[in-house]
Image (tube, helix red, strand yellow):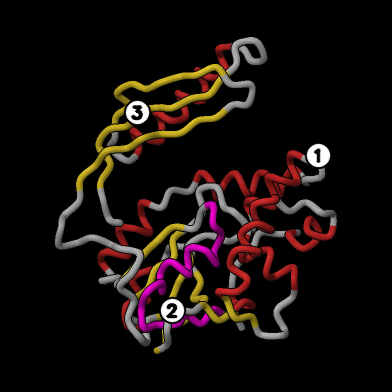
Amino acid sequence: MGGMPLTALAIAGFSNCDFEPSVLKNILKGAVDVLTSVGATLIGGHCIDDREIKFGLSVTGILKTEKVLCVSGAKVGDILIITKPLGIGIITTALKGEKAIQEDVDCAVKWMLTQNKDASEIALKADAHACTDVTGFGLLGHALNMVKDTNNDLMIYANDIPILDNIYEYIDMGMVPIGAYNNLRYFQEKVIFDQDISEEQKLILSDPQTSGGLLIAINEDYLDEFKGLFYRVIGRFVSGNGRVIVR
């Protein structure tokens, strides 16, 4: 949204019976390193006993009220760009299923470690009209939020969407997170798919992302602002009634 993080509280689920304390120490060190890189400070947190490791941050920051990037606000004619490829949920599912190729895992981790800070700052410079991230609801869910209760439709060009390597092969192996199927089931009646869109493409568009990229609605004249940053133009906003149309 264009905000600047200042402080964070850590929230961790961890089992001392199953993992050495050094594991949690390294997780916290990684969190501190990332927070430091964006000018924020870890000031405390909470830990609970949990057989499955969980970790997150509750972040407090500031933003300028005249420069807030909201999920709604896209204008007819705006283009939609995405700043990271899709497929992270599928790769991590393949990792859990012991089917993932190591270089695919390394690539997914690289993207998960890529911060959205630069993309957010450029979006502000480019006078973006709307912005959201792609996380648990997949691209389709977050795209729908951009046109919900508006007089706009969002045309998404499926073949222009960047995806990680070997994603179709992992789908063929059944390495798709249950969240992707749940997302697709929920959004199926709210999204119009061209008949050429395959079931595999629908699952990729519904794939929950961990640390996914940003969806940014901008006037096409400002696209040059994003030179030097990974991005793809994947859609355009048109007059309508709050639908996402995938072609």
Residue 63: x, y in percent? 20, 51
Q: Is residue 186 above or below residue 52?
A: below
Give the labeled residue for mark 1: 98
Q: Residue at x 75, y 71 (%)?
A: 199
Does residue 151 show up? yes
Give the number of the mark in front: 1 or 3.
3
**Cα distance, mark 2 to mark 3?**
37 Å
- Is residue 247 depicted above or below 134 in this figure? below
Q: Is residue 40 above or below residue 132?
A: above
| Callout 1 crowding tier (Cα within 10 Å): few <14, some 14–19, many ≥20 | few
Residue drawn at the location 41% of the way across and 31% of the way down: 33
For residue 242, the mark is: 2
Q: What is the secondary structure assignment of the residue under circle 3? A: strand
Residue 57 on image: x %, y %: 40, 34
At label 2, which amino acid type do we have? Answer: Gly
Q: Which of the two discs, 2 and 3, labels the residue nearer the N terminus?
A: 3
Q: Are marks 2 and 3 in contact (CB under 8 Å)?
A: no
The x, y position of residue 157, in whole percent, is 57, 80
What residue occupies the far bottom of the structure in this picture? Answer: 239
Residue 105: say if magenta.
Answer: no
Residue under the point 50% across and 30% down: 55
> Residue at position x 84%, y 54% from top?
173
Q: Amino acid at mark 3?
A: Leu
Quadrant housing the N terminus: bottom left
On screen, residue 209 versus residue 44, left or right, reads: right
Q: Which residues are magenta?
A: 136-156
Question: Sequence order check: which comes first, mark 1 or mark 3?
Answer: 3
Q: Which residue is mark 3?
A: 9
Name the side, left or right, on which 72 lies relative to 195.
left
- The three-letter code of the residue at mark 1 reads Glu
Label 2 SS: loop
Q: Local crowd at mark 2 within 10 Å, few (<14), some, or many (≥20)?
A: many
